[in-house]
Amino acid sequence: MRTMSDTMAQFAAFGARQGSFHMPGSSPSRLESLADFGSNPGRLRGHGYCPAGLARKAPLVVVLHGCKQNAGDYDHRSGWSQLADLAGFALLYPEQSPGNNPNLCFNWFRPGDTRRDSGEALSIRQMIDAMIAAHGLDRDRVFVTGLSAGGAMANVMLATYPEVFAGGAIIAGLAYGCASSVPEAFDCMRGQAPSSDEELWAQLRQASPHAGPWPRVAIWQGMADHTVAPSNAEDIAAQWRTAHRLDDAPTREEISGGRMRRIWSNRAGEAVIELNTVAAMGHGTPLASDLGAPGPYMLDVGISSTREIAAFWGIADDASRAVSAQNVPPKSVSPKPIPRSGPAARTPLAAPPPRTSGATVKADPASPTSPAAVSRIKDVIEQALRAAGLMK
């Protein structure tokens, strides 16, 4: 039987694998500390960045780092402040403290930190208000993104304060409400906490009294991710599709090489949800060589998620939005809906079935939802427990 000590050791091992191994402060930081932003019940730190000559009513992007990372290092490697200089928006970087979580993970699974007007969620909300007031930013153009634990916490913010955000982007994250304890968090990460569309919507609906309109959401996931199972990306998409009252089948799908982009549009033809999956990518933020700096869990795969996320939100132009290989326009196909309840909902999600029209993506044998991958994850966890002296 799994004990709490075992689970905490597993969580520590997850943090060590998931986040950057750079010590805090190892990268030059362009951020300034944010002080006196409210009661700060979640005991978080805050950092901000405003480009020189920033116009009034500029957008604000909230960026949440992963475990074992800090605000300055994530900004340096993701390239967000570089893009802010070019596109003219402000940045807010909440930062976890060791007193809250020794691995510097945002506590996306702890009820006291994931409820509206409580804990870490409220601290981040207070920082947003402070940044807007201090710099005259646009309350109608506030966005949030994050990686892994930060991605899960970004979804917490979208769920608990949907009226605050015009959009969000979740990288290797989790559906809101999928866990309320450390053991449940691990089940979610492994894709072993199946939820129907109705259950996912119920969790989102209970997070706030908001009745719409809802933020637009971009989701990014590596299909070779052995830390957060790719099925979690499907759960996030289902959660927000239901909020937007969209069909299971995407409006269009673009496939090129190992990258797939599925887009769901509203009745006005506006893209409100997109799901980006990269077949050979592991756990991390996708980068391209022209923006940011690759490092542990900051992965140069030739796709700048930073630039594409800002373009999806409409706050930065990006000619690379068209997913293409060798300048060939992407082909659109109309895929069959993926079942999301019952046994079929949890089949490996490395790629859809081959199609006779349009491009195809080969199934990824290293999918973390396969039995072999699950066994490897178990082996890694057990090795960490033995190293910590918690298992013989």
Image: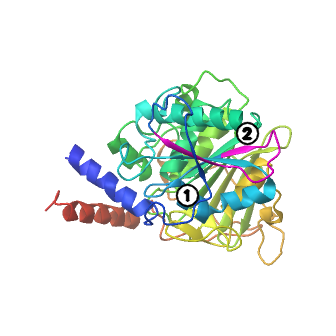
Residue receiving disc 1:
72
158 above or below 301?
above
Q: In which quarter of the image is the C terminus?
A: bottom left
- Front in this rendered view, residue 326 or 294: 294
Q: How many numbered markers are drawn?
A: 2
The residue sitting at the bottom extreme is: 326
- Front in this rendered view, residue 29 or 126: 29
Q: Is residue 120 visible?
A: yes
Say which residue appears at 73% left-offset and 59% top-offset.
Answer: 83
Residue receiving disc 2:
135
The residue sitting at the top extreme is: 209
Nearest to N terminus: mark 1 or mark 2: 1
- Front in this rendered view, residue 326 or 97: 97
Q: Is mark 1 on a helix, strand or loop?
A: helix
The magenta stretch is: 44-61
200 above or below 1?
above
In screen coordinates, is 85 left or right of 180? right
Q: Which amino acid does label 1 sit on?
A: Gly
234 above or below 207?
below
Residue 112 placed where, x, y %?
Answer: 41, 30
Say which residue appears at 49% left-offset and 69% top-offset.
Answer: 296
Residue 59 placed where, x, y %?
Answer: 76, 43
In screen coordinates, is 374 left or right of 40? left
Q: How far apart are marks 1 and 2 (CA)?
A: 20 Å
Q: Residues within 10 Å of mark 2 (few under 14, many from 20)?
A: some
199 above or below 108?
above
Residue 214 placed where, x, y %?
Answer: 70, 33
Q: How crowded is mark 1: few (under 14 residues within 10 Å), some or many (20 or more)?
A: many
Residue 247 sits inside the magenta stretch: no
